[in-house]
Image (cartoon, rainbow, N blue to C red):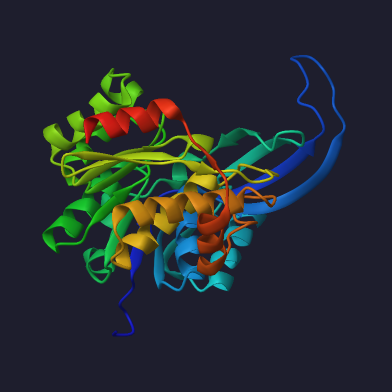
Amino acid sequence: MAANRVDVVGLGLNATDTVMVVRDFPALGGKERVVSLSRQAGGQIATALVTCQRLGLKTRYIGKVGSDEGGKFQLESLRNEGVDIAHVRMVPGAPNQFGHIIVDQATGERTVFWDRDPRLAVMPEEVAPQAIREARALHLDGCDVEACLCAAQHAKQAGIPVIADLDTVYKQVERLFPYIDYLLASANFLPSATGEDDPFRVLEYMAREYRMKAPGMTLGRDGALLYSEGRFIYSPGFVVETVDTTGAGDVFHGAFIYGLLSGWQLERTLDFSNAMAALNCMALGARGGIRSESEALELIAHGSRHVNKAYQAGAGSRC
């Protein structure tokens, strides 16, 4: 592989998180003592790329960071992981995107408060075509829609698959749909974007209307549901001792890209993605529990699973 080639290029969010662990989440107006406080690197696309990098893929990040300590911390975290940051721009005078994350110690569930300075938005003209065409896959989150659209068009022209992690219904994000091959949206995204609440019907609709190769959705502890070539694939989530759910979806996407580029069947790829996401929940922070391929395969072989019978039955009856 030439020096400038990468396996996956990602365009989208990074964030510097302040993670607070509390014993109980207080009611509105209440008080609760903080058990622990730490700074962690996160963000949808950045964390997915770090997952790919740790699994052995060569990655490139396109995005912006602030010039404050949070931005420097994020940039250094990517550099230390070996991610190609040649296309990352530091914005003078702008704070980095931040998240204040409160983790309920009893359940591991997190609540996120965040903000992003408008100056951190990536513009279409800032997306270098060659930076996309040198990759084997493109990963997007739809945040900066015009830039994502530009990148997706370059990928399509080069025959590069486009994977998307869509969680927020950004303005005009639907313009991206025709360019997405593998959509792995959050459970609430597609109902909000389309008005269709039935998960099976909405995935069939996305495949039919936008000719997506495999539209799907992540389901939290219940796993993931995917529609491909006229059949549904349901992969239940894994039972683990949850410390922090932050970043689980981002790690899921990174693991999915790894399976896709490894040439695995979709069933195996979904199981692996669920396993990697579950393992990440066993440590604090968005990237705190990213494990190895062998550890994920061990969980697949011997772990227990959260089987949602409704998804299981629905997938089985529609195959």
**Residue 11 falls in image quadrant:** bottom left
Q: Which residue of the protein is positioned furthest toward the bottom in this rendering?
A: 2
Q: Nearer the viewer, residue 199 or 286?
A: 199
Residue at position x 48%, y 49% in the image: 274
**Residue 185 falls in image quadrant:** top left
Residue at position x 76%, y 16% in the image: 27
Residue at position x 31%, y 63% in the image: 264
Q: In the picture provided, is 245 more to the left or to the right than 203? A: right
Viewport quadrant of the N terminus: bottom left
Q: In the picture provided, is 19 more to the left or to the right than 217? A: right
Q: Nearer the viewer, residue 47 or 65?
A: 47
Expressed as whole percent of the image width and height from the top left, the position of residue 134 reads: 25, 72
Q: Is residue 288 above or below residue 149?
A: below
Expressed as whole percent of the image width and height from the top left, the position of residue 192 reads: 35, 22
Q: Is residue 73 above or below residue 193?
A: below
Q: Nearer the viewer, residue 289 or 45?
A: 289
Residue at position x 46%, y 30% in the image: 308
Q: Is residue 104 visible?
A: yes
Q: How many marks?
A: 0
Viewport quadrant of the C terminus: top left
Q: Is residue 9 above or below residue 57?
A: above
Q: Which residue of the protein is positioned furthest toward the right in this rendering?
A: 33
Q: Is residue 45 visible?
A: no
Expressed as whole percent of the image width and height from the top left, the position of residue 148 reads: 29, 48
**Residue 78 falls in image quadrant:** bottom right
Expressed as whole percent of the image width and height from the top left, the position of residue 118 reads: 45, 40
Q: In the picture provided, is 278 more to the left or to the right than 249? A: right
Q: Nearer the viewer, residue 296 or 82?
A: 296
